[in-house]
C-alpha cells in the first residue's frame, strides 16, 4: 500500500494513532503523532485534518508532503487480540482516573490481555487495569537506531514541544537488555503516566550510573482524545459481535 491508500484505511478504521514524517512549507521535516483523521472540508482529499497529540489541537496536512505514515499506538478492541510479533510492548492503560503505561516482553501469539486478566489481574486505585492500546518499542542496538539515543542532553529536546515522554533506559550490568529495561518519566509532574522512577532525579542523585546507561527511548503519550475515541470504537465493536 502507498501513503494515500494507508490514509484511506486510517480514515475508514477511525482508530489508532499514526506517526507521520512531514515536510513543511519551509522544507523542515517533523515527526507528528496524529489521530481522528479525516479529509479536509476546505481542501478536499488532497489534505487531511487530524488531532496532533504533541500540540493537543487539530492541524491540516497536505498528503503530498507526508513522507512516512505508519501505526504508532494500536488500539485493542477485542480481549482475544494477540501479540503480532515478539518484542517489548508498552501498553496505554486505564487506571483510576487517568491513563498510564505498563511495559512487558511478549511473544507472538500471546493474548494482548495476558498481563491484565486471571492471575495477572491488578488494580490501580479503585479500577481494574485495562489495556487500551499498545506500542512496540524498537529493540536497542549498539549500532545507530533512529528511535534510541545515548545522549542525556537530548532529554531536553523532548520538552521543546510539550511532549511528556516516557523514557525506557537500560542498565547494562548483565548485558541483557531484556532483563535490564527500566521505565522512567522525564518530568516529575507527568501525572498521566505510571513509571518506575523519575529519570532526572535518579540521574542527579547517582542512582543511575553513567557507566551503565545505554540509551533512552521516547514514547509519545496516549492522550485523552485517543481515550475518548477508543471507547466509542470499542462499544461499536462489542455491539457488532452481539
Image (cartoon, grey):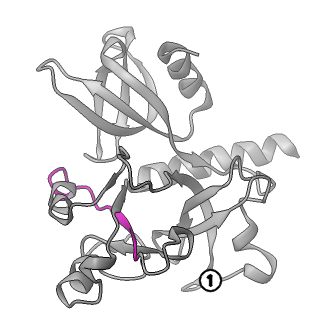
In this orientation, which residue lies closer to the viewer: 169 or 25?
169
Check disc 1 and report the residue beneath it. 123
- Is 85 in front, or is 150? 150
Q: Quadrant of the N terminus?
A: top right
Picture residue at 57% right of the left edge, 54% below the top: 134
Q: Is residue 187 left or right of residue 94?
A: left
Q: Is residue 138 rendered to the left or right of residue 211?
A: right
Among the 4 quarters of the image, the one containing residue 93? bottom right
> Residue 102 appears in which quarter of the rendering?
bottom right
In reply to whether residue 231 is colored magenta, the answer given is no
Question: Residue 38: x percent and y percent?
Answer: 45, 24
User: How many numbered marks, from 0 up?
Assistant: 1
With 170 as the anchor, is 235 left or right in this view?
Answer: right
The quadrant holding residue 67 is top left
Q: Which residues are magenta?
A: 159-171
Tell me where residue 29 appears, x and y as whole percent: 22, 28
Q: Residues within 10 Å of mark 1 (few under 14, many from 20)?
A: few
Residue drawn at x 18%, y 58% is 154
Residue at the right extreme of this rendering: 242
In the rendered view, would you say 134 is above or below 129?
above
Q: Is residue 40 above or below residue 19?
A: above
Residue at image x 26%, y 85%?
202
Q: Nearer the viewer, residue 31 or 241?
A: 31
Q: Is residue 208 left or right of residue 102?
A: left
**Dot 1: element:** strand
Where in the figure is residue 177, as x and y percent of width and height?
50, 69
Question: What is the x, y in percent for residue 22?
Answer: 29, 26
Q: Is residue 161 magenta?
A: yes
Amino acid at each position: 500500500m502507498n501513503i494515500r491508500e494507508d490514509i484511506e484505511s486510517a480514515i475508514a478504521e477511525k482508530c489508532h494513532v499514526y506517526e507521520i514524517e512531514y515536510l513543511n512549507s519551509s522544507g523542515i521535516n517533523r515527526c507528528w503523532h496524529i489521530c481522528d483523521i479525516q479529509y479536509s472540508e476546505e481542501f478536499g482529499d488532497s489534505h487531511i485534518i487530524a488531532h496532533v497529540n504533541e500540540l493537543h489541537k487539530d492541524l491540516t496536512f497536505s498528503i503530498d508532503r507526508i513522507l512516512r505514515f505508519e501505526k504508532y499506538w494500536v488500539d485493542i478492541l477485542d480481549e482475544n487480540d494477540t501479540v503480532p510479533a515478539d518484542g517489548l510492548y508498552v501498553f496505554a492503560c486505564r487506571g483510576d482516573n487517568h491513563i498510564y503505561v505498563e511495559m512487558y516482553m511478549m511473544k507472538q501469539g500471546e493474548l494482548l490481555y495476558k498481563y491484565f486478566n486471571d492471575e495477572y489481574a491488578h488494580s490501580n486505585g479503585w479500577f481494574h487495569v485495562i489495556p487500551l492500546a499498545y506500542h512496540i518499542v524498537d529493540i536497542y542496538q549498539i549500532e545507530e537506531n533512529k528511535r534510541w539515543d545515548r545522549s542525556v542532553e537530548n532529554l531536553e529536546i523532548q520538552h521543546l514541544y510539550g511532549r511528556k515522554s516516557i523514557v525506557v533506559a537500560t542498565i547494562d550490568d548483565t548485558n541483557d537488555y531484556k532483563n535490564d529495561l527500566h521505565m522512567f518519566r522525564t518530568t516529575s509532574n507527568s501525572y498521566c503516566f505510571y513509571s518506575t522512577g523519575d529519570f532526572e532525579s535518579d540521574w542527579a542523585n547517582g542512582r543511575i550510573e553513567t557507566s551503565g546507561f545505554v540509551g533512552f527511548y521516547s514514547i509519545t503519550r496516549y492522550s485523552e482524545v485517543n481515550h475518548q475515541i477508543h471507547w466509542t470504537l470499542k462499544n461499536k465493536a462489542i455491539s457488532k459481535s452481539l
